[in-house]
Image (spheres, rainbow, N blue to C red):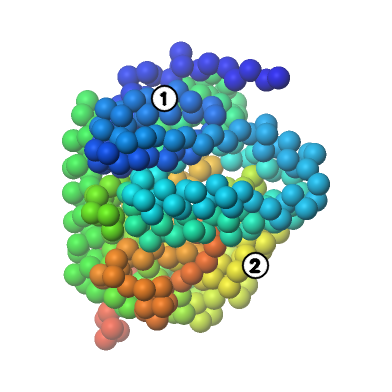
Amino acid sequence: MTIVPNFQTVVDPQKLEKLAEVAIKVGLRLEKGQDLVITAPIAALPLVRLITKHAYMAGAGIVTTFYSDEETTLARYEYAPDGSFDKASGWLYDGMAQAYANGAARLAISGDNPMMLSGQDAAKVARANKANSMAYKPALEKIANFDINWNIVSYPNPSWARQVFPDVPEDVAVGKLADAIFAASRVDLADPVAAWAEHNGNLKKRSTWLNGERFSALHFTGPGTDLTVGLADGHEWHGGASTAKNGITCNPNIPTEEVFTTPHALKVEGHVSSTKPLSHQGTLIDNIQVKFEGGRIVEANASKGEEVLNKVLDTDEGARRLGEVALVPHSSPISRSGILFYNTLFDENASCHIALGQCYSKCFLDGASLSQDQIKAQGGNSSLIHIDWMIGSDKVDIDGLRADGAKVPVMRKGEWA
C-alpha cells in the first residue's frame, strides 16, 4: 500500500488557510444554513479540512465530501472488464443533482495528475468519459445553468507538481506549485478578500464596456488564425463575480482573469490555431488547428494528441460547436508567470480562449428566465462537454464587429485596446 506523503512542510499553512477562507467568502459566499458538496482528490485532504472548518464557521448546514484517488482510478484500467468503461455512477450524480436542487452549493478542488491516464487505452478513456458525462448531465446542468453558487480552487497534489516542475525534487516541486497557486489565487496578499473585491471591479468594467458595445461578432487575426466568432442573440458578457439564480453572488473560478460570453453556435467561420497545449484526460493535445464552417468544426488537426481530439469532437453534435468565447490580456499574472500548469483552470487565464460544447445560460440577457429551447433559438449550444483551449497571444488582434459592419479595436497584440 502506498502511503501518501505529508508535504505540509513545503505548503505555507497561513496561505493555505487564506485559500480556504477565500473559497468560502469569495468563491462561494456560502450562506448560513446552506449545505455544501465538495469533490476533491484525496491528496487535497489538508485543504478540504480547512474549507470544511470555514464552511461551518460561516454557518453551513452540512458539508459532504467525495474523494477521488489516482491509484484506484488506474486500477480500473488495469483490471476492470471491458464493459466497465461504458458505465458510470449515475446514482451518485443523481444525488448531487438533487442536493443542488435543494439549494446546496458546490465546490470542486482540482489537483489531479493531468497525465494520469496518458498510458491508458485512448478508446477506453473516451468511452469512460462519455459514460461519465451522460451520467453527470443532471448535476452539470444545475452548474452550467448557474442555478447554484459554485466554485473551483486548487491544491498542489504532488503528482501534478511533478508534471509542472519535472526537473526538481518532488518536495521542491510541490512548494513551487503551491506558491504559484497562492499567487494566482491572490492569497499571498495581506487581505485577499479585499484584493478580490478590487479585481472583480476591474473585470466588471471590461464586461460593462463590451455589453454596451453590443458587438454582433468578434474577429481574431494572428499566426494561423483568421476567425470570426458570431455572438449569440441577446448575449451578455460576464467576468469575475456573478449572481446565480439562487441570488448568491459568487466567484465560480479562482483564479480568474477572463471576461466571457456565449458565441452563436451556427455563426463561427474561418480557421484558428491554439497558442498553448491543451491537457485533456491524460493527453497533451498540442498545435491544434481547426476550420469552422457554419459554426461547426469541419477539419481538425493537432501535432500531438490528434486521435484524442477527434474522439472529443465526436462526443455529440454540440461538441464541434462553441459554447464560450473569453478574452484575457496577455499580461495577465498567470501568463507572466511563464508556467504551463497543464490545468485548464489556470492555463485558460493566461490567454484568450474558446470552449467546445455546452454554453452558459447566464451569458444571455435575462438568462435565468429563458428555457432551453429559447437559448437554442438565440444561438446557445448544447453538449455533454465543455472544454476550453487557448487561442490568444501577444501576436493576436481582436476586433469587435457591429451589425452595420463597423470594426472596433478590442485587443491589439494581446492587450486591451
- Residue at 46% x, 79% y is 266
Q: Nearer the viewer, mark 2 or mark 1?
A: 1
Q: Is residue 275 left or right of residue 82?
A: left
**Image spot of residue 259 (x, y percent):** 31, 57
Q: Quadrant of the N terminus?
A: top right
Q: Is residue 40 above or below residue 277?
A: above
- Residue at 52% x, 59% y is 137
- Residue at 47% x, 56% y is 140
Q: Is residue 249 above or below residue 374?
A: above
For label 2, the SS is: loop
- 286 or 137: nearer the eye? 137
**Image spot of residue 306 (x, y percent):** 68, 59
For label 1, the SS is: helix
What residue is shown with label 2? 314
- 74 or 408: nearer the eye? 74
Q: Quadrant of the C terminus?
A: bottom left
What residue is shown with label 1? 49
* N-terminal-most mark, 2 or 1: 1
- Residue at 39% x, 44% y is 106
Decide: few, some or many residues near mark 2? Use Cα within 10 Å; few <14, some 14-19, many ≥20: few
- 135 or 152: nearer the eye? 135
Q: Which amino acid, by three-letter code, is at mark 2?
A: Asp
Q: Is residue 77 above or below residue 226?
A: above
* Badge number at residue 234: none
Q: Is residue 300 left or right of residue 102?
A: right
Residue 16 visible in rendering: yes
**Image spot of residue 399 (x, y percent):** 32, 70
